[in-house]
Amino acid sequence: MKGKMLVLLGWLISLAAHAEETRPNLLFITVDDMNWDSVGAFGCPVEGITPHMDRLAAEGMKFARAHVTVAICQPTRAVWMTGRYPHRNGALGFDPIAKEVPSLPEALKGAGYLTGLLGKERHVVPTRHAAFEVIRGMKELGQGREVEKYREAVREFLARAKAEERSFFLMANAHDPHRPFAGSDQEKWRPRPAVRKTYTPGEVPVPGFLPDLPEVRQELAEYFTSVHRADDVVGAVLEELEAAGMKGNTLVVFVSDHGMPLPFAKTNCYYDSTRTPMIVRWPGVVEAGSENKEDFVSGIDVAPTFLAAAGLPNLAGADGESIVPLLKGGKVEGRNKVFTMINTISGGKAYPMRAVQDERYLYIWNGWADGKTEFKNESQSGRTMKAMNQAAKTDPAVAARVEMFVHRTTEELYDLQKDPSCLKNLLDEKGGSATSRSSAMTKALWHWMKDTDDPQRKAFEGQVELALD
């Protein structure tokens, strides 16, 4: 009997060791302030703009309906790290997550993973830095933009993982294409981070939500130059992974934290505010070159997915769920809509917004819009808003867009099939199908606010006509 027990014990130890060896490494790559359609694989017409992201997409799965939860850097990263909506993790804006809320890096470190953080260190669980065994800050990485510094940092991290024979979780965050854009007047660093290619105003597209003005094109040229540099950083990270011989056993998730830092994108709830070019590569699990066009995936699903891939339980109290079944080609019920929001911005001012999007429509509630309050955020600090303000003096169409951006209206409804740039608020036309659709969307949003104990629910009830069952 004793002999059998020893054999069983040895088998269990061997099984545990095998599980340790076969669990995947986890690589989370993010870029800062990049629109979903700035990537070639997602339809960007600028030739050769993102070759490394495009290769990753060809080797993995693209998600056509992936959205971040908050189109602001720190709060959206807090969602990624906790699997919870902002009003459930404590980080409404540039705030630390609540002390009692568990986080992804803590769970992975506790399970024996080597944890590392490159870039955006002040925005990723800033009060939980002990959860990361390796941290390289913005200045150590050439303002978060020097390709070779990322390459060196990744090489050193992977060498340590090999030496210690540990699976790893590495979050590599490029600071591009966040302002200051490459070559812009705002880029005061000396020396400036190097760029391989500089784009001209005539080479870049103007998104539908912005007017085609010379100064807008100039800023977009600087933005796309920064996008290309971000792609070089992504390429360096992936090349070091392959050079280390770890590509085959590494789950890679790539996202942008939200849309471009220009009016009607960043710090809003529009389609181009929250859609993210999500790519997942997992050799042997994810079909190369595949695309999920049906399921909505949210920022709240990031932590649950990494944990499920590692064979670990979801974080206590998480709102999100793992998408591993989708990565394996399975079907999951209930992924037919996504909820997004804004609470407070980097300056501390509150602009409460809530939104719900399904396969066709986007409904936005602007709780702050009273006809007097003016919307002010970082996306207005460059050339584009100044050009729009100037053009508004003589162009009624631009003047109307400026007025809409600055003062907004309490409710907005857009048909994304016909109007993905969100130019025509269907609720400007009272009655008919728009009112019916709005009623269904407000009802869905109210139930979500109630289920998640959203502190904005009472204000929502006071401003919006609700038809609840």
Image (spheres, helix red, strand yellow):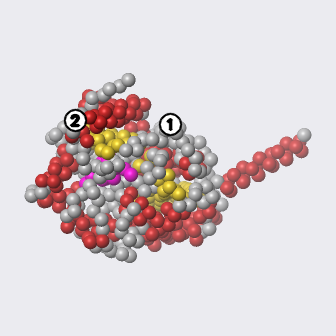
Where disc 1 sits, the SS reads loop
x, y percentage for residue 399?
14, 53
Q: Amino acid at mark 2?
A: Lys
Task: Indicate whether residue 271 is drawn in magenta.
Answer: yes
Kindly give the residue lying farthest to the top in the view shown: 469
* Quadrant the C terminus occupies: top left
Disc tally is: 2
428 and 7: which one is in front? 428
Residue 86 makes an appearance in the image: no
| Viewer-side residue, 227 vs 95 | 227
Which residue is under mark 1?
A: 317
The residue lying toward the viewer, choosing from 130 and 296, is 296
Pinpoint residue 312: horizontal percent, then vertical percent. 60, 45
Residue 269, position as x, y percentages in the image = 32, 46
Residue 85 in the image: above or below residue 224: above
Calculate the distance from the C-alpha at mark 1 to the C-alpha at mark 2: 41 Å
Q: Which residue is mark 2?
A: 430
Residue 397 appearing in the image: yes
Q: Is residue 165 left or right of residue 177?
A: right
Stretch in magenta: 262-275
